[in-house]
């Protein structure tokens, strides 16, 4: 499994390192990358002619700072029992540079950290996270909190679509050994079911309990598949609430460390489908998220 780990300043990537260590993916190949906007010359600062050496010194300072951060990150990874096989300084806007690098090395997962302390920092850090979440073709691990060395409690939100079925199989192939509990969550808002029932009054069954029973059975089937992950305790929730509320309530009630969710589509068109559930969960909510893509 090939993972691109985005190294940032401040050290929010430490959250991603800790979460990767907690997930315990076997046979990982970690590429630690740090992106900097390289200067093109003194005109970048509006400096007078003959000031090229100033821009060159600033560029050298950026390069040195990036290499220092990568060395420090590699040392922290070693302390967590993970080795970075490659360290790369990238040029360009961090979100775009990380996505391009992940495409180049055919990565399976991009892991980044993000912690919002204030409106300005949240805007800057969020722009990188948004860029990665929207544009990456790979799965994304977005870590928002420090993570202790303990088994993880996860909520797996699913619509039981064929796409999500494939993504669950992808997760099983990755075989994260650090998950101790998975709650399978499916939401079918009761008001929507009522509306469907009104639109189909001649149906032989009552649509609301029928749909709910179908989701219960699909959840149970998915729980049996997740048994392939090993000795993982699985639980099932079928919620009548809108999806965002169902996720928030289940994450809180289960004291979950990580939300696992699927996202289909890329770019501006993909944003339309991604945005309905996965995008708000990744960007606006406070919990760490694993967005499965493929």
Image (tube, helix red, strand yellow):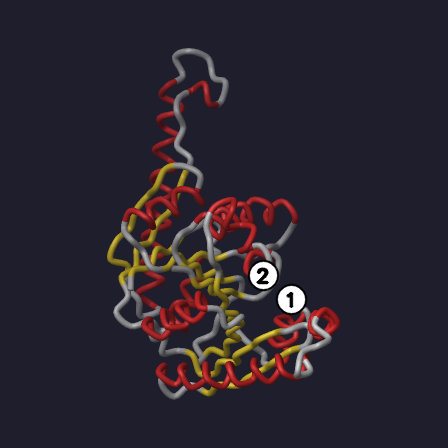
Residues 94 and 202: in front is 202
- Can you identify the residue that label 1 sits on? 244
Give residue 60's position: percent from left, percent from top.
34, 33
Q: SS at mark 1?
A: helix
- Position of 194 with respect to 269 (left or right) is right
Residue 15 visible (yes or no):
no
Q: Are marks 2 and 1 in contact (CB under 8 Å)?
A: yes
Q: CA separation, marks 2 and 1?
A: 7 Å
The residue carrying pointer 1 sits among few (fewer than 14), some (14 to 19) or many (20 or more) residues within 10 Å by Cα, namely some
Closer to the chain start, of discs 2 and 1, is 1
Identify which residue, 259 or 151, lies in the foreground.
259
Residue 200 left/right relative to 183 = right
Residue 157 is situated, as x and y percent measured from the top left of the image, at: 53, 72
Residue 100 in view here: yes
Residue in view at x 40 percent, y 52 percent: 137
> In the structure shown, which secondary structural element does the residue marked by tag 2 occupy?
loop
Residue 72's quadrant in the figure? bottom left
Q: Quadrant of the C terminus?
A: bottom left
Label 2 sits on residue = 277
Nearer-the-camera pick, 236 or 57: 236
The numbered disc on residue 119 is: none
The location of residue 89, given as percent across then percent down, is: 33, 43
């Amino acid at each position: 499994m090939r993972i691109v780990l985005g190294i940032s300043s401040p050290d929010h990537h430490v959250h991603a390192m800790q979460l990767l260590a907690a997930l315990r993916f076997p046979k990982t190949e970690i590429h630690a990358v740090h992106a900097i906007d390289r200067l093109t010359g003194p005109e970048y600062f509006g400096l007078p002619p003959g000031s090229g050496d100033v821009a060159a010194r600033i560029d050298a300072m950026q390069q040195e700072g990036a290499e220092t951060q990568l060395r420090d990150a590699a040392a922290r990874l070693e302390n967590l029992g993970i080795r970075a096989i490659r360290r790369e300084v990238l040029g360009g806007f961090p979100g775009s540079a990380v996505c391009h690098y992940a495409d180049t090395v055919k990565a399976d997962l991009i892991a980044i950290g993000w912690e919002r302390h204030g409106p300005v920092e949240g805007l800057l850090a969020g722009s990188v996270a948004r860029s990665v979440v929207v544009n990456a073709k790979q799965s994304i691990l977005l870590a928002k909190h420090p993570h202790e060395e303990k088994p993880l409690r996860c909520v797996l939100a699913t619509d039981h679509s064929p796409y999500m079925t494939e993504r669950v199989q992808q997760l099983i192939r990755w075989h994260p050994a650090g998950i101790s509990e998975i709650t399978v969550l499916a939401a079918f808002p009761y008001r929507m079911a009522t509306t469907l029932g009104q639109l189909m009054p001649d149906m032989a069954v009552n649509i609301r309990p029928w749909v709910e029973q179908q989701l219960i059975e699909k959840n149970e089937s998915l729980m049996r598949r997740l048994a392939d992950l090993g000795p993982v305790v699985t639980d099932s929730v079928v919620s009548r609430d809108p999806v965002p509320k169902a996720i928030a309530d289940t994450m809180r009630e289960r004291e979950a460390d990580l939300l696992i969710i699927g996202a289909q589509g890329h770019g501006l068109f993909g944003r339309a489908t991604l945005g309905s559930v996965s995008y708000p969960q990744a960007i606006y909510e406070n919990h760490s998220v694993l967005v499965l893509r493929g």
